[in-house]
Image (spheres, coloured by chain):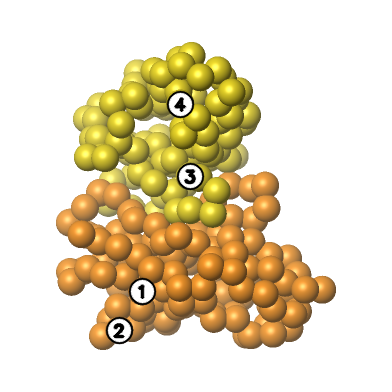
Amino acid sequence: AQSVSQHNHHVILSEAASLELGCNYSYGGTVNLFWYVQYPGQHLQLLLKYFSGDPLVKGIKGFEAEFIKSKFSFNLRKPSVQWSDTAEYFCAVNALSASKIIFGSGTRLSIRP
Amino acid sequence: DAMVIQNPRYQVTQFGKPVTLSCSQTLNHNVMYWYQQKSSQAPKLLFHYYDKDFNNEADTPDNFQSRRPNTSFCFLDIRSPGLGDAAMYLCATNQRGEETQYFGPGTRLLVL
């Protein structure tokens, strides 16, 4: 069965620090990969996605993620975080053979002003 | 703006009293999903509709039912809510073949 692991449950950073949130998945076939973000009091929204092609994908608000197939990873990065990046971040995987996506348990990011 | 709308945003019900949550979409997507999200946990898929085809997750309790009368609307019925059903319920849509899902704001259910 597919699963998604986000090992960091809560990350606290100061403004301007660099960010990397880990995501690993278990599935041997072809996958689509997503990062969703949930700002306080708001709905889940897509941050970025990887379907195929360049394994380094760029999303909104300066975020990027790199798909490393050999490591089954899709880590999220941002070189310099802002206070407004405070949110919950969910990694998600969709196996091409399935019609649903599996979410990781989420990482709460807190940014100190 | 095209969007996924959920009503109500907050719902309070009594233990064992049936409750219905609604979701509507203006995206004309053919797939609609219902997720349950408890505090600090991942959204958990309950079921989804592909057009009128209903797909239930194996571990979704029988207490949870769904209806999709047309493309735009989908309902989540909880027949006899228990205290453990208190959660945020998320509706999402996508177009089959375009796997990005679009989420509504959720309905927070409180069971007294």
Numbered disc 4: secondary structure: loop
Count residues near mark 2 (Cα–Cα under 10 Å), then give few for <14, some for 14-19, many for 20+: few
The mark closer to the camera, 4 or 2, is 4
Name above or below for residue A90 compared with residue A73. above
Q: Which residue is mark 3?
A: B37
Disc 3 from disc 1: Cα separation: 21 Å
Whether pointer 3 and pointer 2 mark residues with C-beta atoms closer than 8 Å, the reply is no
Tell me the shade of chain B.
yellow
Q: Which amino acid type corresponds to the residue marked 4 in the rendered image?
A: Gly
Q: Position of residue B19 (x, y in %)?
A: 48, 18
Q: Are marks 3 and 4 on the same chain?
A: yes
Is residue A35 depicted above or below B92 in this figure?
below
Q: Residues within 10 Å of mark 1 (few under 14, many from 20)?
A: many
Residue at the right extreme of this rendering: A113
Q: Chain of mark 4?
A: B
Left-right relation of A74 to A63: left
Q: Quadrant of residue A95?
A: bottom left
Residue A41 visible from this viewpoint = yes
Residue at the image position 17 percent from the left and 56 percent from the top: A97
Q: Residue at x 44, y 69 (%)?
A: A6
Give whichever of A68, B69 is nearer the camera: A68
What residue sits right under mark 1 in the picture? Answer: A24
State the residue position of label 2.
A71
* Whole-number angstrom distance, CA of label 1 to CA of label 4: 34 Å
Q: Which residue is mark 4?
A: B82
